[in-house]
Image: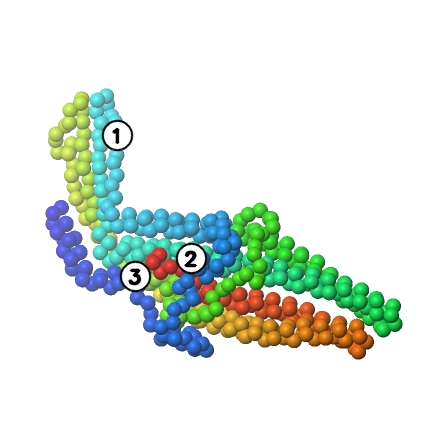
Amino acid sequence: MKVLQRICMALAVTVLAGSCSFYKKYDRPDLPFVDSLYRRMEVLPDSISTAAVSWDKFFTDTILQGWIRDGLKYNTDLNIARLKVKEAEAALLSAKWALLPGASFTAQGGLPGSFSASVSASWETDIFGANRNGKRRAQAALEQSKAYEQAVQTQLVATIAESYYTLLGLDEQLTISRRTLQTWEENIRTLDALKRAGKTNEAAVLQAKANKLSVEADVLTLERKIMEMENSFCALVSVVPMPIERSTLAEQNLPEELSAGVPAELLCRRPDVRQAELALAQCHYSKNIARAAFYPNLSLSGALGWTTGGGNIVLNPGALISNLLASLTQPVFGRGVNKARQQTAQAQYDQAAYRFRQSLLDAGVEVNNALNMWQTAHKRMEINKKQILTLQAAVWNTQLLMKHGNTNYLEVLTAQKNLLQAELSETTDRLDEIRGAIYLYHALGGGYDLQQE
């Protein structure tokens, strides 16, 4: 027995030096293109990313903050993601226990006053790191589940904010349409008076009424969209359908300056990018496990037992059994299967590497598009303000001229329709500006605290 133990231990020491490669931890592959992700944007090397701002500092509307907190507490998808983290934690605990010795206890009764019992233990030495790589793979899976939870949370915050601002935009459009409806009613009364005075005709009155009916239809459509959006919002924060408390679009104050920061920040802030990298890490450890299958497994086991009879412990060679056994298992006929598993693991690793690279490229595209959307909407807002001021003056002048008979009703109708469209466009561009800020915040992995890692 001692000879067998010495042989096994000598073999373990001999092969230990050759097993180091199986313990190699995952290293991020070289990604030379990362610094070019924002090639179409001007990014200062020391600029602070918008994503470094927590969501409750980025979205300053206190009512919106309350809704976001409700969503983070009750949203179904986020709670499921949290349970996935617990599931991964259990899997990691199981992988850790696989590195420790196992023990069992058995007892058996016989004739009156006699019984036998034994305790046995076994331990797989894991010289080539199959279990250790399994634990690291489980650790990467846990981190990936946490990244998934963070991705769901970031998406949820962005979706709640976008839905909230969409409601404010619809409210603003409804206010403009109702105000325009009142203007058309005044126009109809004015045109009726002018018709009676012989300064215009029935066609002008009918055209004004037709425009008023068109706006009335738009009001009904907006009211329907608001109710649908409120119902969707309720489902998002997991509450029963009800009117949504909210402020106004004019009260909103988002950051005036947005920065994408350093492109490499996407590697640690974007949850989906971290998910892709952690999937790559899992495949790395799966490769190590597949390679370890080509080498022998060394297991140590031992047992301790005793037998009693008539209330006394029987002390004889059969009563006290203690043994230490070492077993060495070498794969012989399974090399074909192991080779196939190794090729599969390598192919899966290469696929994960491509996905990781593509996730970074996609992230760069999203950041570029979001920042461009925000910048374009910001510039359009400046043009809209000038356009609205001009059209307001045009409406006032055409109305004044029509009352004095120096212009016809078509010029008045055209000026008012153009003003309505300009005001609605201003609301749309304001929403695009806000959406651009939200999309950029989300594209950068906004609100993620690096100290959580």
Question: In screen coordinates, is 444 left or right of 243?
Answer: left
Give the distance between the C-alpha atoms of the residues marked 2 and 3, in whole angstroms.
Answer: 29 Å
Residue in the picture at 32% in, 48% down? 94
Amino acid type of disc 2? Gln
Q: Secondary structure at mark 3?
A: helix
Residue in the picture at 54% in, 75% down? 379
Q: Earlier in the sequence, mark 3 or mark 1?
A: 1
Seen from the viewer's position, the closer of residues 389 and 380 is: 389
**Quarter of the figure with residue 250:** bottom right
Select label 2 or label 3 by which is in front: 2
**Quarter of the figure with residue 314:** top left
Residue 54 got which mark?
A: none
Question: In screen coordinates, is 374 left or right of 48?
Answer: right
Q: Secondary structure at mark 2?
A: helix
Residue 150 got which mark?
A: 2
Q: Give the answer, above or below, for where 146 lies relative to 401.
A: above
Give the distance between the C-alpha atoms of the residues marked 3 and 1, in whole angstroms.
Answer: 43 Å
Amino acid type of disc 1? Gln
Residue at the disc numbered 3: 288
Question: In screen coordinates, is 386 left or right of 75?
Answer: right
**Quarter of the figure with residue 413:** bottom right
Q: Position of residue 74 (x, y in %)?
A: 49, 48
Q: Earlier in the sequence, mark 2 or mark 3?
A: 2
Residue 108 got which mark?
A: 1
Select label 2 or label 1 by which is in front: 2
Quarter of the picture containing the C terminus is bottom left
How packed mark 3 is, by other alpha carbons closer than 10 Å (few <14, some 14-19, many 20 or more), is: many
Q: Position of residue 260 (x, y in %)?
A: 43, 70
Amino acid type of disc 3? Asn
